[in-house]
């Protein structure tokens, strides 16, 4: 596996641990639909939360969340629509981004709730 793929998987694992520690229920990871993959689908209170995880080894080229573009947002919306139809879940949906910066064995996490309203 390429090093950047391994870094991404580590970041997703860190994000899952972070969400659990904050009281989120993890419903599914790496859900694939059409041409999109949702990194984490979680639930908290009456919300179904789509979480895009962006992991980088530094912020030198911009923050990880800066790499979620309009095309990616459209794909995530289509994917969660499919998930909701498959599972018949009736909850409000929120889109979050978790930014993970890995430096050595240390991780810095930033959780942006309702992230797509920031675009």
Image (cartoon, rainbow, N blue to C red):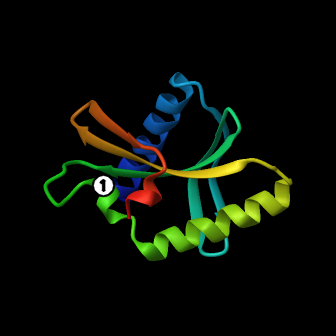
Q: Nearer the viewer, residue 13 or 54?
A: 54
**Rendering coords of residue 52 (x, y %):** 48, 54
Q: Which residue occupies the extreme left position in the image?
A: 60
Name the image quarter holding the C terminus. bottom left
Rendered position, 84 above or below 73: above
Dividing the picture into quadrants, the one containing residue 81 is bottom right
Decide: few, some or many residues near mark 1? Use Cα within 10 Å; few <14, some 14-19, many ≥20.
many
Residue 116: x and y, percent? Answer: 46, 59
Number of on-image labels: 1
Compared with 110, 36 (above or below) is: below
Q: Which residue sits at x=20%, y=58%?
A: 62
Residue 92 image offset from top left, x and y in percent: 69, 49
Say which quadrant the N terminus sits in: bottom left
User: Residue at point 19% right, 49% down?
Assistant: 58
The residue depicted at 52 percent of the width and 25 percent of the height is: 22
Would you name the residue on which mark 1 appears? 64
Q: Based on the displayed image, in which of its 4 quarters is residue 45 positioned? A: top right
Q: Along the horizontal axis of the image, is 69 left or right of 52?
A: left
Q: Where is residue 76, by image quadrant?
A: bottom right
Front residue (pair 1, 78): 78
Whether residue 1 can be seen here: no
Q: Secondary structure at mark 1?
A: helix
| Relative to 36, 112 lies left or right | left
Q: Residue at x 29, y 33 (%)?
A: 107
Is residue 44 visible to us here? Answer: yes
Residue 85 at x, y = what percent?
82, 62
29 sits to left or right of 3: right
Q: Residue furthest front?
A: 117
User: On the rendered structure, is 84 left or right of 95?
Assistant: right
């Amino acid at each position: 596996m390429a090093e950047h793929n391994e870094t991404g998987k580590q970041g997703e694992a860190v994000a899952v641990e972070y969400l659990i520690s904050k009281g989120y229920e993890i419903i599914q990871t790496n859900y694939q639909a059409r041409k999109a993959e949702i990194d984490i689908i979680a639930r908290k209170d009456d919300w179904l939360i789509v979480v895009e995880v962006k992991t980088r080894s530094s912020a030198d080229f911009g923050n990880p969340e800066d790499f979620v573009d309009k095309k990616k947002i459209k794909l995530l919306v289509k994917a969660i629509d499919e998930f909701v139809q498959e599972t018949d879940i009736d909850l409000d949906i929120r889109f979050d981004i978790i930014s993970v910066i890995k430096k050595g064995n240390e991780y810095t996490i930033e959780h942006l709730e309702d992230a797509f309203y920031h675009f």
